[in-house]
Image (cartoon, rainbow, N blue to C red):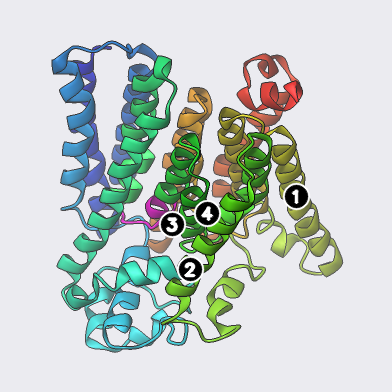
Amino acid sequence: MTVTAASFATVLLHLSIAVAQQHLARDSGLKVAALWYYASAAGLVTCYAVLLRSIREVLSRKNWILVVGIPLLVQTGWLFSRPVLSIDAYSYLVDAAHLHAGMNPYEHAVGEAAGTGLGEKLAAYRWRPKGISPYGPVWMNLLRTVGPFAQDVTIGVRALKIIAFGATTLTAWLVFCAAPPTVRVRTLVAFWWNPVLIIEAAGEGHNDAVMGLAIVLSIWCLQRRAVAAAAAALSAGVLTKWTPALFAPAYVAYVWRSGLATWRNAWIAGAAVVALTTTAYFPLWIGADTFAGLRAVAAPRLVASGTGVFRNILAEHPTGYTLVRVFATLATIVAILQATRAARTLRDLVRTSAMIALTFVLVTAPLYWPWYVVTPIALLALAEDWALIILLTVTSRAVAPLDLLRVHDALTLTAQVWLTTIVALWLPAAWLVWRATGEGAVRSPFVRTLRTH
């Protein structure tokens, strides 16, 4: 497929998906809209996969303009489409409004907006009241910039999406800079053209784009041997959503083995992390209650995740359910230990960080949403694991509209949970197991990295 043909098809298919999603949100011809969505998504992922396979490292000036400009154009278009696959952007807007009013989001639940003027406006967008925000202080402080626009839902949500769009754009530049010169263009295409990253960032405004930017920035800094800057960048990711903390042991191991673990680097990195953490938390800290939202998210319930589907099955056997969660946690610990052992080069660090992220998302996380694969996809682009990126893209887009279908009573909660778990979690996990133990092991960068060391 030529870049010109891929560009034309990509623009049309993104437009088609956007229209289909709006029809799904309005419950107008639900079956037709669902078929429309899935046909468009299948076409878009196929176009992306073919382009990724056929792209060349040496491009003409025209093709360079298309490779960089088409995703930019598509994401700009997504800014004008209201989020419909989730309500997160609207909940972010409530937190922004609370901050602008001098209220602490760690003390005031998002649901307190119900019945207010803003809450009534958001109700028209199918927003549902929720509890305390589980997000970190870096994200909360970013929301302060949106606060002045929060009472206007259209402008406020668009401002949130611009933040996510900007984060994705900066990440694309860092991905291009950090990629090996021999696959730099393909790595850029793998990230910049990916449908999940485009739709979930510019389309839905999720803050995973900000977390992904911080992680890739930390890798770029390590590539330049800037340990303190890398530590600060990784900390910014942790202070957005806590999961990048799982990468810390592998980062430390890489720094130690690469000869960067000097006392000077240690003191400066430690000071940078403490300064960033203190500054971010200072206006928001309320003691242990600061983490109330995070604790609530981790509470057991029937939800799509590696353990959530067993909640009802093992309801009468709490010990059994506890063991399931313990085994899931142990899987992440094993992944972290393996990553720490294998992180000898920067490429090893990228690959093993992707392994940790995937293990957490597919096995251990207390819940799964389609945008959770944004960070794994960014790391997998740098790890040159194109096949796994395509698989995660397919499964993410397959389950993306299920919550919307459930809201319209086309699915029960149980059906949504099982479908999401089987398609988005168990299918990629089974494929990874096959690749690691079967014929696919030869092609697995993760397995090659771990076996080498």
Say left or right for 424 vs 170: right
Lower sequence index among marks 3 and 4? 3
Say left or right for 315 vs 118: right
Residue 399 in the image: above or below residue 343 = below
Name the residue: 44% across, 22% down.
Answer: 180
Mark 4, residue position: 416
Query: What's drawn in magenta, residue-wise?
Result: 204-211
Q: Give the residue type at disc 3.
A: Asp
Q: Quadrant of the N terminus?
A: top left
Residue 110 in the image: above or below residue 246 = below
Q: Are marks 2 and 3 in contact (CB under 8 Å)?
A: no
Give the foreground label among 4 and 1.
1
Residue 300: where, in percent of width, then height?
67, 68
As measured in the structure, the alpha-carbon distance from the residue carrying label 1 to the one carrying label 3 is 31 Å
Disc 3 on helix, strand or loop? helix
Mark 2, residue position: 275
As measured in the structure, the alpha-carbon distance from the residue carrying label 2 to the one carrying label 4 is 43 Å
